[in-house]
Amino acid sequence: MVKDNNIPQTCEQTCQCRGHDGPTRLIVLTGGPGAGKTAVLEIVMKQLCEHVAILPEAASIIFGGGFWRMESKTGKMAAQRAIMYVQREMENLVLDEKKWSTGLCDRGLADGLAYWPNDEGDYWRALGISKEQVYDRYYSVIHLRTPDANSGYNHQNHLRIETAEEAAQIDEKIHNIWKKHPKYHMVETEAEFMIKAKKTIDFIREDLPECCRIPLFS
């Protein structure tokens, strides 16, 4: 997703407004492994305007950078704490720079709960904020459902280690984590991925500031 790790990735279309002076919105794209989040973000990078920043998946940064991926409880907790830290700091950077109207996040801070080996209360204590505070942090949440083995689930991403059944279980956990967010959108799996992608992008466009709502899929 990140072409140059030294440059924050922004969308490519020129926006009619001259700048952004309102609060920055964070929009979460979430879902289980193989749901298509990263593919959608690659599409919208070409479609959306320069005032939209794309945040890469923190887990891919962590594991792709060589962080140990261990099955022990301590290993899982260490990995999720590292992911929490990277995720939060990327989001804080987008919020504090005040140069973008929107940050599109490949997962949000609550996603790690689906991988946390202890109870939910322990996760929020490790994160240092409550579930309500996490909900307040994000303007909206768009959940792309994970396909099953017969509907397109695959291991093209070399960091994806889950079976289709395991991915579906994670996807359901993510649904239960986010479903009470006041702007929670669900995007079901489609036989044609571009139908799913268009539905997702329609939700993204609805949640952008009005000046950034340029026509998509024209």
Image (cartoon, rainbow, N blue to C red):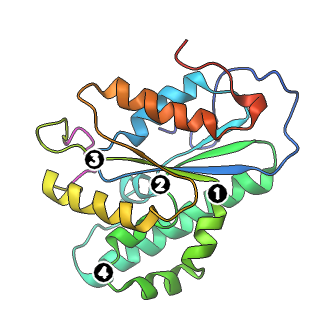
34 to 61, vertically: above or below: above
N-terminal of the pair, mark 3 or mark 1, is: 1
Q: Secondary structure at mark 3?
A: loop
In three-dimensional space, the C-alpha distance between marks 3 and 1, rounded to whole angstroms, equals 24 Å
Q: Secondary structure at mark 2?
A: loop
Callout 1: few (<14), some (14-19), or many (20+) C-alpha neighbours within 10 Å? some
Q: Secondary structure at mark 1?
A: helix
Q: Nearer the viewer, residue 79 or 103?
A: 103
In three-dimensional space, the C-alpha distance between marks 4 and 1, rounded to whole angstroms, equals 25 Å
Query: Which residue appears at 88% of the width and 27% of the height?
Result: 18
Callout 3: few (<14), some (14-19), or many (20+) C-alpha neighbours within 10 Å? many
User: Where residue 113 appears, x then y in whole percent?
Assistant: 40, 72
50 to 98, vertically: above or below: above
Question: In this orientation, does residue 7 appear?
Answer: no
Question: The magenta stretch spans which residues?
Answer: 155-161
N-terminal of the pair, mark 4 or mark 1, is: 1
Give amino acid for label 3: Thr
Q: Which residue is mark 2?
A: 107
Nearer the camera: disc 1 or disc 2: 2
Q: Which residue is mark 4?
A: 117
Query: Which residue appears at 57% of the width and 54% of the height?
Result: 183
Task: Quarter of the image for the C terminus: give it.
Answer: top right
N-terminal of the pair, mark 3 or mark 4, is: 4
